[in-house]
Amino acid sequence: MKDSIREKFAAAGVAVPEILFPDMDLSRWACVACDQFTSQPEYWEEAEKYIGEAPSSLKLMMPEAWLGRKERAIHEKNIPETMGCYLRDGVLKNLGPGAVFVKRETSSGIRRGLLLLLDLSRYEYEPGNKALCRATEATVEDRLPVRIEIRRKAPLEMPHVMVLFSDPGDLLMGELDKRTEGEKPLYDFDLMMDSGNIKGWHLKNEKVLDSIADILLKLKEEAPGGMLYAVGDGNHSLAAAKKCGDRYALVELVNLYDEALVFEPIHRLKKDGRVVDYIHGKEECLRLGSRPGYEAVIMPDYPKDRLYQDVIEKGVLPKKTFSMGQAKDKRFYLECCLRQRSEE
């Protein structure tokens, strides 16, 4: 890639990754973000049964529903070792430099995204910061140690992070729609557990990459309050990566104004008068809250067009103000890349 294109991406706070991709049954490889279904261990048990002995991203991460299990320490130890095995055994193939344009079928429509490396020197999570990329809710420090412990030893970067950008004119994704029309995708398959279809195109052409960089720079010039990116999902993973000294994190950029991106309230599940979990989906929260000793607290909607202004004015939003879609609509682990520390 030309240095001029790299420099444009750097000015926009991102970089082009070298994608590592599995050569196998992708329906067993891809699994949902680790922070979903925390009060429903049966979801993860069913996923394990479906995957069986096949290589899977589920074996490369720690579902938060498992944090209270006695096997947690063994699982933490196994994650870096399994990553190393997948690299040595050729489970993951290096596709070379390129972004990935994603179209994900969700319960609210086809959500579009773009995988790039986020420059963590341009991201901050302290309330009131003026960084190019900002957290949208408070970071809970006691949620970081388990992520940091696994990440320090892990050779791979595997994202469920979705970072928002404000593009009301649909400049970026509209351009990629045109660029990929009629082109064969890198992947096209149905996700496990009835989570919809996903397609992805590996964008390697320098003209395409240059156009992406130009659009991001234009959006940067117009960014309210100097805030081009707002973390939608996965802020604690980004915070852990920054604390580990990583230079970049692989993320999916999603337009705040994408028609399929729906902000939904995150409800509270209480037991004995205190919050014990945050639940995606009103009906699921009501179901869980109907058990003896539990109470469902249904939260109001949060309009997504308020997000940037509220973060700029208030620093961060209250914890768990909104969710980007239902639990099954969250990003699935799929693409990987090698971790890049700051000294590299």
Image (spheres, grey):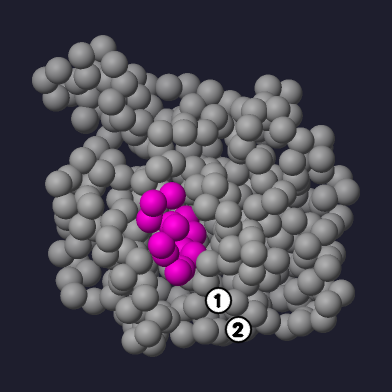
**Residue at the spot 34% in from the left edge and 86% down from the top edge:** 89
Q: Which mark is residue 19?
A: 1
Query: Label 2's element?
Result: strand
Was residue 196 drawn as part of the magenta stretch in this picture?
A: no
- Per the model, the C-alpha gap separating discs 1 and 2 is 6 Å
Disc 1 vs disc 2: Cβ atoms closer than 8 Å?
Answer: yes
Residue 31: % across, % down: 34, 61
Give the vertical position of 268 relative to 208 (above or below). Answer: above
Give the vertical position of 19 relative to 330 (above or below). Answer: below
Give the number of marks. Answer: 2
Residue range corresponding to the magenta coloring: 148-160
The answer, for residue 142, to whether it is visible in the render is yes
Name which quarter of the figure residue 174 lies in.
bottom right
Q: Mark 2 is on which residue type?
A: Gly
* Residue most extreme to the front: 343
**Residue at the spot 22% in from the left edge and 50% down from the top edge:** 72
Q: Along the horizontal axis of the image, is 88 left or right of 76?
A: right
Query: Label 1's element?
Result: strand
Q: Which residue is mark 2?
A: 96
Residue 81: % across, % down: 31, 70
